């Protein structure tokens, strides 16, 4: 029965990931062509800030709340307590993140110039903050958020093609994106109330603090991940031009789509492995993923120029091709590393080791970025090399502890 639930959630998440990345991949070449790499770079830069603010608001509940919900699936009273506490904490953090955005825009002239774009991008943070994907993941009912997200993604795609006609329409992109997530959050909360009889109830401060501190270790890991992934776009935006950011984002978005292809496996495995500790099944899945990733990597390196030209249908700058090749190597490293993280080490009780790999990796990455900054060497290629070094470190760290803490003890 439990394996049927795993397969069902995997299929639901697969459908969600296909639409979450296939539809944006339809709009991506259109936006690059209509908005030009410069305005597309501005949108990417503003979205990187929004993602960073969302990491603060999410506060690691995408892991801690999933674990809590999965442990009390049949306890309505406990589910109400968890749901209410998480929503209240997120509301407080949302207000804090908005204040932080206002502060950044006020202090730095670079942000003041296009401040309305950053405020519009904050709609994404609001929608994502209240979208309770962690609840549905915890109770292993992913079909609900799949349906909601697919509808929103289709609507967003249609709106882009209908209304974005010139580069002056670039502000519509964060508007459509943010409003879509806000509507999705409202619908999801309504389903939770109607279908699962879960509604918001004020909780004692002591109870709220328990969930806050329980999620703290996951927050450190999440914000560390952001420092060497989404923050790359942020640092490039601070030092280089919007056009350079646009070139970087053109390669990065294809990389994210490739990584997302395996996302449903990792996401579905986490609650399943938390309950069953089925290492035998996990080892088979990991082997299949590694073999598939290897063949994908070979194809990407051989057909890089052809793939980019076919996809974007414009003359591809050599910088984009070089970045795409580096992202292809990053793809296989990051995918295997992700599978060894929370779906394995975290689910088996070694959360600290999974978190530390990310935190230490983030420290290493920040040292690399600061070195590039003080030596006036920040560029897309150099940042990518630093990211590769960071991901290799995280992978080696997780492989070492997987063997030391799990396989050495059990086999």
Image (cartoon, helix red, strand yellow):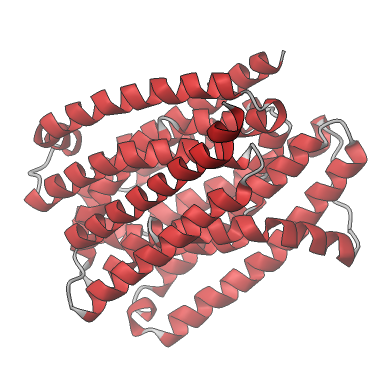
Residue 73: quadrant of the picture? top right
Question: Does the rendering let one see residue 365?
Answer: yes
The one nearer the camera, 108 or 190, is 108
Give the image location of residue 48, x and y in percent.
Answer: 40, 60
Answer with left or right where residue 130 lies relative to residue 202. left
Figure quadrant of the N terminus: top right
Instruction: Classify 217 as above or below 272.
Output: below
Answer with left or right where residue 321 lies relative to residue 17. left
Figure quadrant of the C terminus: top right
Q: Residue at x 31, y 28 (%)?
A: 293
Give the image location of residue 22, x and y in percent.
Answer: 37, 31
The one nearer the camera, 63 or 128, is 63
Q: Residue at x 29, y 54 (%)?
A: 389
Residue 109: quadrant of the picture? bottom left
Q: Residue at x 25, y 61 (%)?
A: 383
Give the image location of residue 405, x and y in percent.
Answer: 57, 41
Question: Does the rendering let one see residue 343?
Answer: no
The one nearer the camera, 377 or 200, is 377
Q: Residue at x 43, y 70 (%)?
A: 116
Residue 170: quadrant of the picture? bottom left
Give the image location of residue 243, x and y in percent.
Answer: 19, 62
Total tally of numbered discs in the picture:
0
């Amino acid at each position: 029965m439990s394996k049927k639930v795993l397969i069902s959630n995997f299929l639901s998440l697969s459908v969600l990931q296909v639409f979450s990345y296939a539809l944006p991949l339809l709009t991506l070449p259109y936006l690059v062509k209509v908005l030009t790499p410069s305005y597309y770079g501005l949108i990417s830069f503003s979205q990187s800030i929004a993602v960073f603010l969302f990491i603060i608001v999410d506060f690691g509940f995408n892991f801690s709340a999933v674990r809590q919900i999965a442990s009390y699936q049949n306890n309505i009273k406990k589910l109400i307590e968890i749901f209410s506490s998480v929503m209240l904490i997120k509301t407080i953090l949302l207000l804090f993140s908005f204040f932080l955005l206002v502060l950044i825009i006020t202090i730095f002239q670079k942000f003041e110039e296009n401040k309305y774009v950053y405020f519009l991008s904050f709609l994404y943070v609001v929608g994502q903050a209240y979208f309770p994907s962690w609840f549905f993941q915890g109770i292993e009912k992913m079909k609900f958020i799949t349906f909601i997200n697919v509808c929103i993604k289709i609507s967003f795609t249609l709106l882009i093609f209908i209304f974005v006609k010139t580069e002056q329409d670039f502000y519509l992109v964060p508007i459509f994106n943010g409003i879509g997530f806000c509507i999705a959050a409202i619908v999801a909360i309504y389903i939770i109330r109607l279908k699962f009889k879960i509604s918001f109830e004020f909780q004692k401060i002591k109870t709220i603090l328990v969930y806050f501190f329980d999620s703290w270790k996951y927050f450190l890991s999440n914000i560390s991940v952001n420092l060497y992934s989404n923050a790359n776009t942020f640092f490039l935006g601070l030092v280089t031009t919007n056009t350079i950011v646009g070139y970087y984002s053109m390669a990065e978005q294809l990389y994210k789509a490739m990584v997302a292809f395996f996302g449903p496996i990792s996401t579905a495995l986490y609650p399943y492995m938390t309950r069953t500790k089925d290492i035998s099944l996990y080892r088979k899945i990991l082997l299949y993923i590694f073999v598939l990733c290897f063949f994908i990597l070979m194809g990407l390196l051989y057909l890089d120029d052809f793939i980019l030209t076919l996809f974007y249908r414009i003359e591809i700058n050599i910088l984009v091709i070089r970045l795409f090749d580096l992202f292809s190597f990053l793809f296989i490293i990051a995918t295997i590393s992700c599978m060894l993280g929370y779906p394995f080490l975290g689910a088996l009780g070694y959360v600290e080791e999974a978190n530390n790999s990310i935190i230490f990796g983030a420290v290493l990455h920040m040292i690399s970025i600061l070195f590039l900054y003080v030596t006036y060497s920040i560029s897309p290629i150099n940042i990518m090399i630093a990211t590769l070094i960071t991901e290799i470190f995280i992978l080696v760290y997780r492989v070492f502890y997987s063997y030391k803490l799990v396989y050495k003890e059990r086999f």
